[in-house]
Amino acid sequence: AQSLINFFAVKKNQETIAKLKKAGLRMQAEREDLVNKLNGNSFLVTGTLENYSRNEIKNRIEQNGGRVVSGISKKLDYLLVGKNPGSKLTKARKIDTIKILTEAEFLEMIK
């Protein structure tokens, strides 16, 4: 951090940056403002969802600031459950910290 402070304190560097801005260089990358509604929480999907394929729901989770994981563990935050969930639901119920969500509850989270 100190090296950045030192860099920007040098008058010549400030002038160079000003020239680059004047020439049209954008100092911030343009990107869609991604919403961080899921706050980096981890999600695992089990069963068949009504409105999304696996890839689509994975993208929705990531676009909203969540992470998709591949297995049940104590580090898992949410299990998103569709129809015919299988053994993942049984395993998740044994870990008190995992929150179990329906598809409708998940969609409410990202509204």
Image (spheres, rainbow, N blue to C red):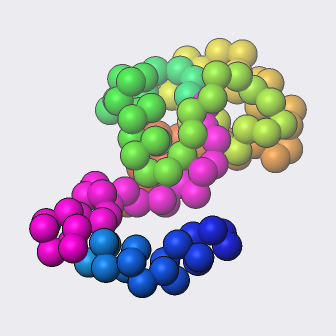
The magenta region covers 19-44
Residue 93 shows in the view:
no
- Left or right of 105: which side holds 71? right
Is 62 magenta? The answer is: no
Q: Quadrant of residue 78?
A: top right
Quick check: 58 left or right of 33?
A: right
* Depicted 6 relative to depicted 55: above or below: below
**Quadrant where the image shows the C terminus:** bottom left
Relative height, residue 46 to residue 74 (above, below)? above
> Residue at point 31% right, 79% down?
15
Asked whether 82 or 11 is in front, the reply is: 11
| Along the viewing direction, whichever of 32 and 13 lies nearer the viewer | 13
Residue depicted at x 39% and y 35%: 59
Quadrant where the image shows the N terminus:
bottom right
Identify the residue at image location x=80%, y=24%.
Answer: 91
Please provide percent x and percent y for residue 92: 77, 31
| Residue 105 in the image, given as x and y percentages of width and height | 50, 50
Whether the magenta-drawn stretch holds residue 21 is answered as: yes
Task: Name the magenta segment's main secondary structure.
Answer: loop
Count of marks, rendered view: 0
Viewed as shown, does residue 103 lie left or right of 42? Answer: left
Q: Position of residue 11 (x, y in %)?
A: 42, 84
What percent of the width, then of the height, locates residue 79? 64, 36
Q: Residue at x 58, y 57 (%)?
A: 39
Above/below status of 77 relative to 93: below
- In which quarter of the view is residue 95 placed? top right
